[in-house]
Amino acid sequence: MIIERRKIFYIISLILILPGLASLFVNGLNLGIDFRGGSIVHVRIATDVAATEVREALAPVGQEKSEVQKSADNTYYIRTSELDQEQTRAIINALKTRFGEVELLSAESVGATIGRELSLNALMALGLGLALMLVYISFRFEWTFGVAAVLALLHNVLVVLGVFSIFQWEVNSPFIASILTVVGFTINDTIVVFDRVRENLRGIKKPDYLNILNKSILQVVNRSINTVLTAVITLTALLLLGGATIKFFVAAMLIGFVAGAYSSICIASPLWYEIKKSD
Amino acid sequence: MNRTMSIVISAVIVAALLLAAVFLQKPLVNNLDLGLDLRGGLRVVLQAEEKPGEPITEDTIQKAVGILRDRVDSLGVRETSLYPQGKDRVVIEIAGEEDPEAAVDILKNVAQLEFQDEKGNVLVSGKNLIDAQARINQNSQEAYVELKFDKEGAEAFAKATSANVGKPLVIVLDGEVISAPRVNQAITDGNAIIEGDFEAKEAQDLAVLLRSGALPVSFTVLEKRSIGPSLGADSLEKSLKAGIIGILAVFIFMLGYYRLPGLIADISILLYGLLVLGSMVLLNAVLTLPGIAAFVLSIGMAVDANIIIYERIKEEIRWGKTLQAAIDAGFKRAFWTIFDSNLTTLVAAVVLMYFGTGTVKGFAVTLSIGLVINMFTALTFTRYLLVLASNLTKNIRLYGV
């Protein structure tokens, strides 16, 4: 059953996490301007041109070093160091001179200091949130459940971070919301499993943790699968049919939710067993 | 409760909800405050630059906010929000601005106007202005700005012009020379004009800047995001559609898998969605992209609450309880499961709401609203519907057992 095979799950999780972790150390995350500072100008050019041509067109205004990425519907993302108003305007004018009709869709500039603050603030809020969840779980359940739940949660966050690092998908501030969603979903998922364990432990003097865990998991596994299935349905619809701007935002949640459903059963419960066994 | 009564009540609830969903959906969505990331607009964060010997106080920032508000209002846009952030920052958000880029200039300029003599002595400054208007010279078609000084300013200006007859008077804005007209005669009526090589729009912007007065400190742009209206609308519409399709698919799944309770779940989730949207409108909460993530999560948890309840009831039936007893027992147990799982998430959400900013806050507000409403609908409304349904039919096959 589940707990007896925990070593297999640990190995699966390591296979899931280690490449991502290595990539995080070597390549890090592809941080967008929200965290790193800089500017992105998003334009639509009436005629279909190659990204390199756009770069060439920017040479007269000294932005030939900018990174140009072609996207759907003849739109282009131009990434540069932080621009002021005049420089933004110069870019648009240079493009208009070269290509004719150019529509400015969005222009974003973020100073480097604000990016640092954003990450720090988010991390602090998240840390405090985790700490209080631990307190709540310890109060309602037992501290061992809290520790196992938070470990499983870190597992899921690492899976998401790892995937984003390996594929070098760009990470901006909505990514924080994705991670928070993964945290919320995972904790909910894990608590439901632990709630059943708590119920099955009630009134038993010398519990056989292994059997109780297996029994509890079997009792809630239907619910776990169906819940993640419904979430995956909604997220897949958003991923396939939603706007381009939310693609990675949804992808992060999707990966995290699936990892969450897996870890609430195959990681959180075995981890709790390890803690209890060594108690 | 007898059977006829149950039928009537169920029918009324279902009809009322369907009507509400059809007729309230549009007004609710239209009244929802959308964040700039969803509908386009301009967001600027300005950082006050401290100069040695001039510390930035709350008063300075308050003054700056007032002046900036005047300037934003002069742009003639409908919805703006302006507020200080921390000790030395001002956040300006303008929704749906057609040309967000142009608005940035008018906001960050200090607009310190000075009239100087040839040696660079400041003779009159912009703080003595009462009014500034852009005008067009009918003969030359050139734009200029007409100034009106207060009493003190008029006196200073009279003194300045009479002392400099035949010499240029240098007009300086934020350290940049705009023009340096020669003074022909002393001007004593407190009126002056600034000519320069202006376009009509530039003259208008300058007039706005001068009217609103100089900012007490200079600002740098810390963050600026301008999203064109087309991009905002496009991504919102697509995502909304996708969300609706996703939720419909979930409805079908629930119906197929859980049968009668699945139908009840669909009805409960419909009510849930309406209540969340309604609360957001009532609380004037702003829906942002992170808010949508929170909404997706909270719908997920609402579906989960239903699944927990039905799985539990199924278990109780399998253990040999009657339908009525199974529903009772199922709820008693599911109550604490849902309570604890939602409250654990709520604990984190509330922390994020208080300590988070921007993205994190937008997420946490929507999630907190969602969780509270979820506990309410799952534990009261769903239960009521299930009891009603059990009065209608005792066929346990309809419960997917």
Image (cartoon, helix red, strand yellow):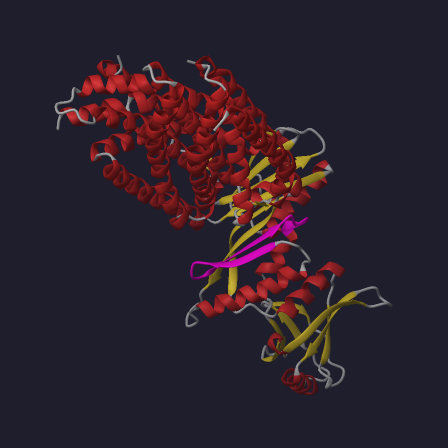
Task: Please tell me how many numbered marks the rendered image carries.
Answer: 0
Left or right of B116, for residue B62:
left
Choose top left, top right, bottom left or bottom right for residue A127.
Answer: top left
Of B326 and A59, nearer the camera is B326
Of A179 and B163, nearer the camera is A179
Residue at the spot 66% in from the left edge and 73% down from the top edge: B171
Of B360 and A113, nearer the camera is B360
Can residue A18 be seen by looking at this rendering?
no
Is residue B97 shown in magenta? yes
Residue at the spot 72% in from the left edge and 74% down from the top edge: B181
Q: Which residues are magenta?
A: B80-101
Can residue B25 be seen by looking at this rendering?
yes
Residue at the spot 63% in from the left edge and 71% down from the top edge: B172
- Check the picture and name the quadrant holding the C terminus of chain B: top left
Residue B124, x across and y down, in percent? 62, 80
Task: From this view, report whether residue B261 is shown above or below residue A170.
Answer: above
Q: Residue furthest front?
A: B2
Residue A109, x across and y down, in percent? 53, 47
Task: From this view, report whether residue A79 is shown above or below residue B252.
Answer: below
Residue B107, x across and y down, in percent? 59, 59
Is residue A196 shown in magenta? no
Task: From this view, report whether residue B246 is shown above or below residue B131.
Answer: above
Left or right of A106, for residue B181:
right
Choose top left, top right, bottom left or bottom right for residue B146.
Answer: bottom right
Residue A149, x across and y down, in percent? 28, 31
Task: From this view, report whether residue A166 is shown above or below residue B298.
Answer: above
Q: Residue furthest right?
A: B139
